[in-house]
Amino acid sequence: MTSRGSWLIVVGASLGGLEALRRLLEPLPARLPAAILVVQHRRADVPPGLTKMLGRSVALPVSEAEDRQPILSGQVIVAPSDYHLLVDGARVGLSLEEPVHHSRPSIDVLFRSAAARGPSVLGILLTAASADGAEGLEIIRRAGGRTMVQDPDEAESSVGPRAALALDPEHEVLPVSRMPARILRLLAADRERSAPPRRAGRS
Amino acid sequence: MTVGLQSQEVDELELTLLLDAVRRRYGYDFRDYAGASLRRRVRRAWQQEGVPTLTALQERVLHDPECLRRFVSCLSVNVTALFRDPLLYRTLRAKAIPHLRTYPFLRIWCAGCSTGEEVHSLAIVLAEEGLLDRSRVYATDLSEQLLDKAASAIFPLTTLQEREPQYRSGGGRGELADHFVSDATHGILRQHLRQRIVFSHHNLVSDHSFNEFHLIFCRNVLIYFGDSLRRRVHELLHESQARLGFLALGMRESLRYTALAERYQVVDEDSRLYRKVR
């Protein structure tokens, strides 16, 4: 189970998100030392195919969130259609509260709940056709977490990325293709910092 | 800050005091609700009342019972629809009804019925399966406001049209509108369906088991509860269930993360339908 110290990556996307998600997740290794929670906007009546589609091409195990599922490193957990996905301590929470920015699941709901984890959170906002996620991303950064926004110039829909940057210009802006390497560097740097100092004379 | 508290800690303190005040004044206990979504809904109640702080909200709730009613309905999430998750109704018809048919009299409990769409759907299925006349369906909720709406069983005709595909997909034998008496704009669930349903106030948090049931619906209710409360309510449901009685949870809920998992058999994984075996 992820303790409060291990990394949690929260990702939000809407229009054109599936392609962006694949490009983000495919290069990541199966034993990633972080848990990934994903909100992808979709219509409530669409059958659950997103998880399967991602699962086919991504090395990490991908599952659709189940209430109270433990948040474990090395897993991708996707918000079920028509439920909000929340981080509730070390577990996943679900809720049927009213849509936020006309969306359920809402990216803001996920981001805001994840912000409680403080500096061990990385929030990523990909292509998105509404402002959902902009506020939550700012809350993550203000709580000491890391944040990344897909470069609006390459995003399928730049509305979300632009809204996030208008609200908070401090987010790191990157094309999706550079995000996986950036994530791995971030996790590796953090590991080195937290690893016990090596004794001299051993390689 | 003079007392050395961060604003987040002040918020937490105010929240604790508010929930404690509501419990002591009115008996509604929200203290063990799941934290992340509870905070969201309290924030919404706070915004709706237009007061500057949670402490101000507390003062208003304590002195104004109308504000308490609004607070309770704000904290209860009431998203439901006729034949929401049609798969469940299809599974009920195929896998539960044949067993339920063997009982001379059926007691059914819809716990946390909200505005009642689920219990109305269930009554329709029971009627179509010829079991309604020997059934008594108890529909309970925490919120009086929601129960009033549930008991009225009135829907706009447009809603009945919209839900027709779900009704069909749930195994419906005729048309959804057949089960309603309509005027130009609205339909009310037929009297013989309504009269088998008893609506009453019941608080899963503080009230006890009140009968033994052959089928319990408790869908998307426990998702708002914290771990200890959830354990207690699962015990309550288990205690309220006849041996070999059925339990229907929400589509993304599971017994997997509970201590009671081995006391149930999975009837249908996709519909989250379980059966008490011990």
Image: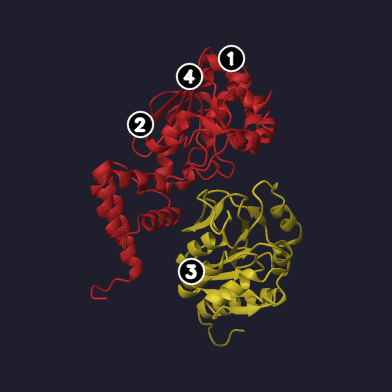
Chain colours: A yellow, B red
Judge whether B159 appears above or below A127 on screen: above
> Of residues B188 and A61, which is closer to you in this image?
B188
Q: Residues within 10 Å of mark 2 (few under 14, many from 20)?
A: some
Hey, what amino acid is under mark 1? Thr
Q: Earlier in the sequence, mark 4 or mark 1?
A: 1
Judge whether A172 appears above or below B186 on screen: below
SS for callout 2: loop
Q: Residue furthest bottom?
A: A201
The Cα–Cα distance between marks 2 and 4, rounded to whole angstroms, is 25 Å
Q: Residue furthest right?
A: A57
Q: State which mark lies toward you, 3 or 2.
A: 2
Q: Say whether residue A144 is visible.
A: no
> What residue did someone put label 3 on?
A5
Query: Residue at 52% across / 14% down in the picture?
Result: B134
Query: Do marks 2 and 1 both belong to one polypeptide chain?
Result: yes
Q: State which mark lies toward you, 3 or 1.
A: 1
> What residue did someone put label 1 on?
B102
The Cα–Cα distance between marks 3 and 1, rounded to whole angstroms, is 55 Å
Query: Residue at 60% across / 68% down in the picture?
Result: A33
Hey, what amino acid is under mark 2? His
In the image, residue B184 lies at what x, y percent?
58, 29
Q: State which mark lies toward you, 4 or 3.
A: 4
> What residue did someone put label 4 on?
B195
Q: What chain does badge 1 belong to?
A: B
Query: Do marks 3 and 2 both belong to one polypeptide chain?
Result: no
Q: Say whether residue B120 is visible.
A: yes
Hey, what amino acid is under mark 4? Gln
SS for callout 4: loop
> What residue did someone put label 2 on?
B208
Q: Residue furthest front?
A: B184
Q: Quadrant of residue B28?
A: top left
> Of residues B160 and B78, which is closer to you in this image?
B160
